[in-house]
Image (cartoon, rainbow, N blue to C red):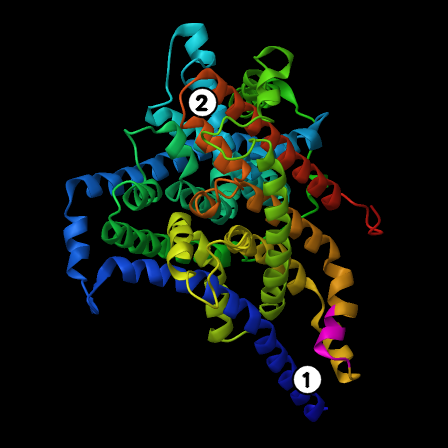
Amino acid sequence: MDLARSEVARVRSAARLGLMALPVAFFGLFFAYPVVAIVQRGLRVDGAWQFGRIGEVLADPGIRQVLWFTAWQALASTALTLLIALPGAYVFARFEFPGKQVLRAVVTVPFVLPTVVVGTAFLAVLGRGGLLDELWGVRLDTTVWAILLAHVFFNYAVVVRTVGGLWGQLDPRQEEAARMLGASRLTAWRTVTLPALGPAVAAAALMVFLFTFTSFGVVQILGGPTFSTLEVEVYRQTTEIFDLTTAAVLTLVQFAAVAAILAVHAWTVRRRESALRLVDAAGTARRPRGAGQWTLLAGVLVSIVLLLVLPLGVLVQRSLKAPDFGYYRELTSSDGGVFLVPPIDAIGNSLSYAAVATLVAVLIGGLAAAALTRRDAGRLVRGFDALLMLPLGVSAVTVGFGFLIALDEPPLDLRSSWLLVPLAQALVGVPFVVRTMLPVLRAVDARLRDAATVLGASPWRVWREVDLPLVRRALLVAAGFAFAVSLGEFGATVFIARADNPTLPVAVARLLSRPGDLNYGQAMALSTILMVVCATALLLLEKVVVVDRTGEF
């Protein structure tokens, strides 16, 4: 028996290393190599590293202002998101009301929308000729409030899903017991429920902070020349000033900051995995009782309508402002200016790129998740897990520009290849695939794999006959998320998408950069199309998630 177990362990270890080979090669070639190339180009002169330039760049008052604003707006966005979204998390966790599932899908739609669409939607409400401008002559598109509200819009679902998911599974009898012992409602919540929710709230806050700290599309569209985050400044230094040294330093600063954020996030996740008394979430939700609960439900519904639904509705309304779908019809023509092809071609380009990126992300992410399945993995595998999250911590702008610099010589001269765009998009999709599939793979009984291995099944056959039937649903969900993320990727794609093959986010940004009502209207029309495509992908995800227990759709 010991010999058999030793053989199983040896086969499992060899299989894990084999599964890691392709993801490691992919990340080394298409992530580490371009990032190192851009940093080296900026900080290495005549074969010598110029690390003294780091201090010079950081001593610049303008750069320090960018660093301060990046951190300040991320903290403010996180606090405002928690303030507005926590009541929604409670409502979705504890209340049962008609249309709850549809509303949950509506709340999640903004999170999968590209940042360009989010910025465009708020521009339609807060910007020139927007709803507020027409009603009261007020414009907020170049103020920090526009950025903060757009970040709340984008990250509302993070809090609802992360905190509300755990809140719905907490046993309410624990809080009821405290009430019976004489504690007030507030005291019982503060001493019983809040400590249990604390790790989930911290994890949600850190994720929101991460997303807002690396914000690009929202700030680029709504901030104007007044506000700049690290991500926007890297783009400006690279494309407008051509100062690669400053761009390289800012890339290193952002990488260090996000690495620290991810380390704290990993710590909070481990805390969240501590033992709690959990029950079926369906059993904790009930109809609101009393005027206070009905008022809370009404307030949450109003906030969702005003903050989430209104910007998207105004976006659609602006796209239909021209008679006879004029803005949509103009998408089929080319004026030879901002595009070399009709803007409508961006739809087919985006769908094609996203499909290829999804295949790559599912392949690489699936292999990586399989390699990370066992919780007792050593430091090598844990380091591999951290590697997979790095694309979320490095400027997508840096990755895109690094592609142009690094992948310019045979046998990897891909500058003129259409593969460049889906490869960059896949880098962002892989972490989502891994985080979707890994919990499900770890939930599979390891004894099933061991038994199949002892009976002589190869690692591939074990995966095909044991794991795949059990994780098929998670695989489909992961593919859907990878598709939505790839469809909306903007930071890297804006560098490498060619003028004759623009993607939807790049096309929207280019149209918004040109003056004139026609360009503005076409941007609204393209954003609406992109929103519909992403929402359709999300609804398909919801369909997969709610399949019945027999596994049939």
Q: Which mark is residue 8?
A: 1
What residue occupies the far bottom of the structure in this picture? 3
Q: Position of residue 142 (x, y in %)?
A: 34, 23
**Residue 300 in the image: x percent, y percent?**
56, 24
Q: Does residue 181 show up?
A: no
* Amino acid on which disc 1 is placed: Val
> Is 551 left or right of 245, judged from the image as shown?
right
Q: Is residue 146 magenta?
A: no
Q: Between 199 and 208, which is closer to the camera in this rendering?
A: 208
Helix, strand or loop at label 2? It is helix
* Other residues around mark 2 within 10 Å, as few (<14) / some (14–19) / many (≥20): many
Image quarter in which the N terminus is found: bottom right
Which residue: 58% across, 68% down? 372
Residue at 79%, 69% in the rendered image: 465
The local secondary structure at tag 1 comes to: helix
Residue labelled with disc 2: 123
Q: Which residues are magenta?
A: 457-463
Closer to the chain start, of discs 2 and 1, is 1
Disc 2 marks a residue whose amino acid type is Leu
